[in-house]
Image: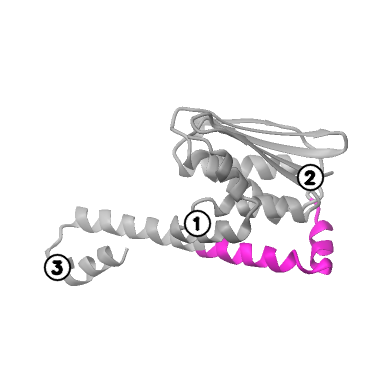
Amino acid sequence: MLCSSEILISEAHSLDRQVISEMAGMLHTGAERLHRLIQNFLVYAKLEIAARDPERIKDLQHGRTPYPKSVIRNIATRQAKQFGREADLKLKLQQVAVQISEINLGKLVEELVDNAFKYSPAGTPVRITSLSHNHRFILQVTDQGRGMSTSQIADLGAYMQFERRFYEQQGSGLGLIIAKRLAELHGGEFLIKSGLGQGTTVRVILPV
């Protein structure tokens, strides 16, 4: 981004409109990516602080979403449009109240769906299902992407090790850590079934 902005500043007078427009688009995309990264840093920090405070955990667990179907559908549809993959999105959602605020449910869904689209090829389905089973809310996101190794899945539980890798990879995977933390702090479970070249299924189980 810095290189592109420096070129625009120093050579704007000699560039045609098309080039300026393309560079501006690149800068905008980079700025959006950086903004999302910073926001995720802040969310992650807040969750780690909350994890050490029983009162904050209690406040989190008092949240409730009476109509999660519309929250999931709206966010998943928006993510699909951002990737230009509306036709790849497959939804099968039940309407059941869940014990998590709409904001936190939305963040959880956003990160899981973003990850599914980001690491799977266009033309392959991203399936999102939600249902109630044994008084638990189950959200599942499945893609046919490159998958994750056993060690990569294990790293999701090793926060210090993951943070080091996070900096090296410029943010890759932080969304899954956020989703996992949100599930745990709401008294739920976060499960991943994946293998390299075999796609990924993430299942989140929350109280209803």
Is disc 1 in contact with disc 2, using a CB cutoff of under 8 Å? no
Left or right relative to 175: residue 62: right
Which mark is nearer the camera, 3 or 1? 1
Depth order, front residue of 126/17: 126
Which SS type dominates the magenta stretch? Answer: helix
Point out the residue furthest to the bottom here.
10
Which range is magenta? 38-64
Which mark is nearer the camera, 1 or 2? 1
- The crowd level at tag 2 (other Cα within 10 Å; few <14, some 14-19, many 20+) is many
Magenta region includes residue 50 = yes
Which amino acid type corresponds to the residue marked 2 in the rendered image? Leu
- State the image coordinates of residue 98 (x, y, percent, origin top left): 80, 45
The quarter of the image holding the N terminus is bottom left
- Does residue 85 lie above or below 32 as drawn? above
At 82% across and 50% down in the image, what residue appears? 99
In the rendered image, which residue does mark 1 sit on? 165
Left or right relative to 7: residue 169: right
In the rendered image, which residue does mark 3 sit on? 13
SS label for mark 3: helix
SS label for mark 1: helix
In the rendered image, which residue does mark 2 sit on? 206
